[in-house]
């Protein structure tokens, strides 16, 4: 059996039209893939500047708006913000600092709240982050400056994974363990203070000393 092959010969005009349609389809597919990749990267990094470049710059970059939210007032020589979402008290309180990084940042917020807040605002301005992230980093710094500084160097110079200080130790298990530990510490020192005020500890110590000396 003889198989015959039928070839369709298109005119030059038709070939040009097919080529243009093919190029259009490929270009559209490539742009769509780029848009999806950029949008995914923006969601993962929390940066809106990448996605705004694809929409003609209609959306303002998130970093720029955060940098403008905090400014240094030369007349008062203080860091200030006019954004209600970034003012003191808009993020977690001293108890949140206690859970995230321990007693040092907690005590700093209780006894030197203004200095703490100024440091947080300065960090927000320099890093372009929100208050919660700035507070998390400040808490980590106050708890252990050496470890925090080493982590930042690794992130910037070695490309290490960025540590989420804003949510550190806030998983349910850590919160429960911290609560139990704190309750135990409060009970111990509370009971100690109560006994000291009543003189029970001194009296008990005196009686034991007398027993050892054989006086009683």
Image (cartoon, grey):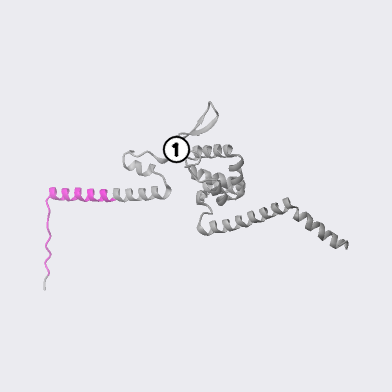
Q: Residue at x 38, y 43 (%)?
A: 48
- Asked if residue 144 shows in the view, the reply is no
**Residue 84 horizontal side relative to residue 1, left or right:** right
Where's residue 112, x and y in %? 60, 39
Give the mark count: 1
The secondary element bearing badge 1 is classed as helix
When the figure is inspected, residue 50 is found, relative to residue 203, above or below; the finding is: above
Which residue occupies the extreme top position in the image? 75
Report the side of 87 relative to 113 (left or right): left
Q: Main secondary structure of the magenta part?
A: helix
| Residue at 73% from the left image edge and 52% from the top image edge | 198
205 or 39, nearer to the observer: 205
Magenta stretch: residue 26 in it? yes
Q: Residues within 10 Å of mark 1 (few under 14, many from 20)?
A: few
The quadrant in which the C terminus is found is: bottom right
- Residue on which disc 1 sits: 84
What span is colored magenta in the figure? Answer: 3-29
Q: Nearer the viewer, residue 101 or 95?
A: 95
Q: Identify whether 83 is placed above or below 35.
A: above
Residue 103 on the magenta span: no
- Can see residue 131? yes
**Image location of residue 204, percent across then percent down:** 78, 58
Q: Residue furthest bottom?
A: 1
Q: Nearer the viewer, residue 98 or 205?
A: 205
At 21% across and 51% down in the image, what residue appears?
22
- Quadrant containing the N terminus is bottom left
Q: Position of residue 119 (x, y in %)?
A: 56, 38
The answer to which of 71 and 211 lies nearer the viewer is: 211
Left or right of 16, for residue 177: right
């Amino acid at each position: 059996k003889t198989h015959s092959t039928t070839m369709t010969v298109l005119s030059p005009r038709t070939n040009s039209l097919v080529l243009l349609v093919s190029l259009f389809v490929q270009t559209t597919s490539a742009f769509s893939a780029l848009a999806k990749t950029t949008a995914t990267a923006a969601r993962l990094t929390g940066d809106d500047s990448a996605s705004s470049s694809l929409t003609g710059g209609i959306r303002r970059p998130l970093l720029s708006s955060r940098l403008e939210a905090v400014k240094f007032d030369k007349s008062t020589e203080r860091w200030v913000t006019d954004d209600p979402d970034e003012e003191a008290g808009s993020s977690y309180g001293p108890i949140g600092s206690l859970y995230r990084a321990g007693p040092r940042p907690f005590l700093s917020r209780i006894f030197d709240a203004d200095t703490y807040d100024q440091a947080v605002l300065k960090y927000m301005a320099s890093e372009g982050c929100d208050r919660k992230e700035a507070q998390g980093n400040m808490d980590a710094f106050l708890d252990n400056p050496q470890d925090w500084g080493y982590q930042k160097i690794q992130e910037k110079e070695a490309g290490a994974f960025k540590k989420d200080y804003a949510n550190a130790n806030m998983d349910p298990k850590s919160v429960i363990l911290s609560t139990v530990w704190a309750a135990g510490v409060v009970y111990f020192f509370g009971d100690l203070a109560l006994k000291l005020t009543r003189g029970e500890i001194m009296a008990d110590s005196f009686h034991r000393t007398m027993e050892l000396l054989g006086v009683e």
